[in-house]
Image (spheres, rainbow, N blue to C red):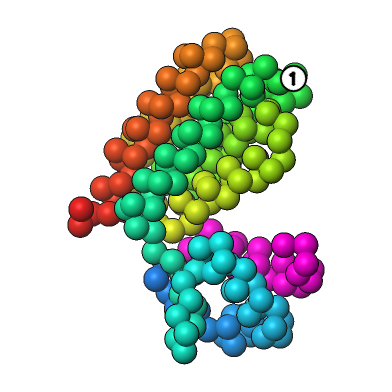
Amino acid sequence: MKKYSNLTLKVYHRIIELMLNYEIVPGQRLVFIDLAKQLGVSRTPVNNALSILAQEDYLDFVPNQGYSVHKLTKKEAENLYEFREVLEIGFLGKAIRNMTEKKQRAFERSKLDYEEAISGRVDRRLFIFDAEFHASIIDMVGNDVLSARYRDICQKIFLRFRTESLQLARILEIKREHHELYEAICHKDVERAKELVRLHHKASKKMLFPLIFPED
């Protein structure tokens, strides 16, 4: 996205932030004139930012109707989860081999961020911290393109559905699963870590999919 102006990129990230905070929701039609007014910028950077988001499949564009926030389908969710799992398991060995003390501290910090964000209710921030915990494993590989791609996949998943219905019990299970995975990686047990990732993703899908796609 280097070819775009700083203002366009600023608007792009601001719209992503609105989606993260659920101020813009799946299925919502976006009026770039209203967005421009809300963000305090001209129409051009907003229109450019919406175009980028549509190219990245965050938005749908219909001629003569404009943009709307893309609603995740079950098939898309399954594909994204599969891709995420393949990336994480496929690079676990290299991540562990390339683990340094500094990277391990960042990994531990991401685990603690999730734990410290747990309260008496489910907060969307937990999904961000969960994704960052897993992304910090990918970061240990040392490939910036891979890290960016992995975070994009995670974002495409949790930006597109509500999280309020998720049970707190599952959040506490995730905390335990994170700790077990952290221990396996710190002990450089590649096969154990891979199995834990598989179980973690399977449990997440089992809990999330009925909430996201109740009609199926």
User: Which residue is rendered at x = 54% and y = 69% of the image?
Assistant: 54
Question: From what the image shows, is residue 29 above or below residue 128?
Answer: below
Question: From what the image shows, is residue 65 above or below residue 162?
Answer: below
User: Which residue is rendered at x = 20% and y = 53% of the image?
Assistant: 216
Q: Position of residue 34 (x, y in %)?
A: 57, 85
User: Which residue is rendered at x = 39% and y = 53% of the image?
Assistant: 76
Q: Amino acid at mark 1?
A: Thr
Closer-to-camera residue (89/196): 89
Closer-to-camera residue (118/8): 8
Q: Which secondary structure, mark 1?
A: loop
Question: From what the image shows, is residue 61 above or below residue 140?
Answer: below
Q: Position of residue 35 (x, y in %)?
A: 59, 80
How many marks the image carries: the answer is 1
Disc 1 target residue: 100
| Residue 177 visible within the image | no
Question: From what the image shows, is residue 96 above or below residue 116?
Answer: above
Other residues around mark 1 within 10 Å, as few (<14) / some (14–19) / many (≥20) = few
User: Which residue is rendered at x = 46% and y = 34% of the image?
Assistant: 85
Q: Main secondary structure of the magenta part?
A: helix
Whether residue 11 appears in magenta in the rendering, the answer is yes
Residue 70 is left or right of residue 38, and the answer is left
Please identify the quadrant where the N terminus is shown.
bottom right
Residue 2 is left or right of residue 55, and the answer is right
Q: Position of residue 172 (x, y in %)?
A: 40, 31
| Residue 6 visible within the image | yes
Closer-to-camera residue (192/204): 192
Whether residue 134 appears in magenta in the rendering, the answer is no
Magenta region? 1-22
Residue 206 is left or right of residue 215, and the answer is right
Q: Position of residue 150 (x, y in %)?
A: 58, 42
